Amino acid sequence: MNLPPNALWIDQDDYDVRGFSHGLYIDGRWRPSSDGRVIGVVDPSSGSVIAAVPDATLDDALAAVDAAAKAATAWRETAPRKRSEILRRCFELMVERSETLAMLISLENGKALRDARGEVAYAAEFFRWNAEEAVRITGEFGTAPSGTNRIVVDYEPIGICVLITPWNFPAAMATRKIAPALAAGCTVILKPASETPLTAYALAALYSEAGVPAGVVNVLTTTSPGPLTSAMLADPRVRKLSFTGSTGVGRTLLGEAAKHVVSCSMELGGNAPFVVFDDADLDAALDGAMIAKMRNAGEACTAANRIYVQSGIHDAFADGLRERMAALKVGPGMSADTECGPMITRKAVDKIDRLVKDAVGRGAKVLCGGSIPEEEGFFYPPTVLSQVSPDADMAHEEIFGPVAPITRFETEAEAVMHANNTEYGLAAYIYTRDVARGLRVASRIEAGMIGLNRGLMSDPAAPFGGVKQSGLGREGGQHHGIAEFMEAKYIAVTF
Ligand code: NAP
């Protein structure tokens, strides 16, 4: 691209984010890429380039590994209380800067400001939670069954971690990895998504201000993620890959990591069913569906991707959902009254359009929305479809957009069968007033997380993650998130 190297500008005077981002963040310093190339950052509400960040080379990536290695010993030997206090300061600074961070997220990702504010609050919580966890890492002490010795188990930082994150939650997906890794005593290299690098760099500036030593967190953006990740994984000092993104890329990375037997955590794609039984509280189910479907305009791995509604409540639910979806205000994320922002790219809009056309071709009825508007930016309107065939492509692929496909069902067994008819297993939602049925169905649905009469389940205090093709490992939760960044060391002791 023909843009000045090592530059960031925002051509919208109202949003001054220049103080945050200067370049690749390696060893506590901002620098351009070694060949001076840059990546343009696009505002999805207009399609225009608003900023540029460096496009890291192989040399830059290896410099980041060197920096993480140089900082590793001092960081792992830093007292847990000290690490905890630094993480706590990261939390406080994020809260102080939350409005600016929210604007930055909204600007580069397109999400509505209210969603961006929610993301900053959620992202900051990972620092607070892990500040509290950092001082509660315990080991084990016992007697061998033979009685000949004692068994001591210590938990040590796993080593240098490569963290790769997607564009849909530019702050939260980074802090959900960085905070537990740092709490465990690891040093990291973060590679954020090319579409949303500004938030990651803004956060990097904040970490150093909070007292995170140089080299403990390194951040680089690149248009060559494959070769750079392969090179970093091939370095024997790198011991962990924590990835959040699509299942396809996750599979590729598992293959790369296998070559060097690098530990992997994989937070991958979803295809969440949202099941509404006849006895559900209708208003609560509609409220829950709006959150589960429309948080981030549907661009969430936990988004309700398939909505199954029992016959007795079906028509009232479909009517209510159409009314609520049609009333949403669509517009640029930065506009104060926007409830549904643009999609991340034109490609994402085209995919949604293809999925809607496929469903309609198989007999679905369009209750609202359903076609690409003629305006600049990457917009798709809130859309409700009914009578969606279980064979429709959207029943098997992530829509990742504001489209709510409804399918009618009759029996509980049928609902469970539909819910499990997918290779994914990240999240699922169940609405019923019968708690026994809710728990029974929750235990039969193959998913890592269930919202029972709730449309939102993400919480740093609970383990986040999926089964089947939705991934490996957990983030957050009591010990779960930190455990991904530690190894058990067993010491047999005779005394
Ligand atoms: P993606 O295309 O898989 O990209 C994710 C990240 O991987 C980006 O940083 C991307 O870099 C990088 N990447 C792409 N190819 C790579 C390669 N060969 N080697 C190393 N890195 C590579 O996913 P996305 O479109 O950004 O995000 C949407 C997906 O993420 C959805 O499937 C969603 O369900 C999933 N997701 C899952 C969770 C969860 O917790 N389970 C949370 C959020 C999102 P570039 O941007 O430079 O291509």
Image: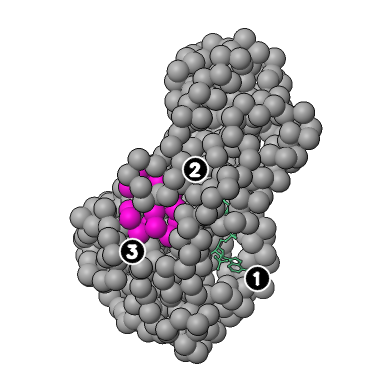
Where is mark 3, residue-wise?
A: 12
Where is mark 1, residue-wise?
A: 256
In screen coordinates, is 43 left or right of 417? left
Quick check: is the Cβ at mark 2 less than 8 Å away from ligand 1?
no
Query: Is residue 468 inside the magenta stretch?
Result: no
* Mark 3 element type: loop
Q: Quadrant of residue 390?
A: top right
Write down the region rendered in magenta: 102-118
Query: Is residue 103 inside the magenta stretch?
Result: yes
Q: Is residue 43 above or below residue 390?
A: below
> Which color scheme did the rendering employ for the protein?
one colour
Q: In front: 107, or 268?
A: 107
Query: Image point 34% across, 77% down: which residue?
Result: 22
Query: Image point 39% across, 66% down: which residue?
Result: 198
Q: Kindly report which numbered mark, 3 or 2, lies closer to the viewer in this rendering.
A: 3
Q: Mark 3 belongs to which amino acid?
A: Gln
For label 3, the crowd category at 10 Å Cα-Cα, with few meaning under 14, some 14 to 19 and many 20 or more, is: few
The CA span between labels 1 and 3 is 41 Å
Question: Which mark is drawn over residue 297?
Answer: 2
Q: Is any part of residue 466 visible from this angle?
A: no
Q: Mark 1 belongs to which amino acid?
A: Glu
The CA span between labels 2 and 1 is 33 Å
The CA span between labels 3 and 2 is 23 Å
Q: Kindly report which numbered mark, 2 or 1, lies closer to the viewer in this rendering.
A: 2
Q: Mark 2 belongs to which amino acid?
A: Ala
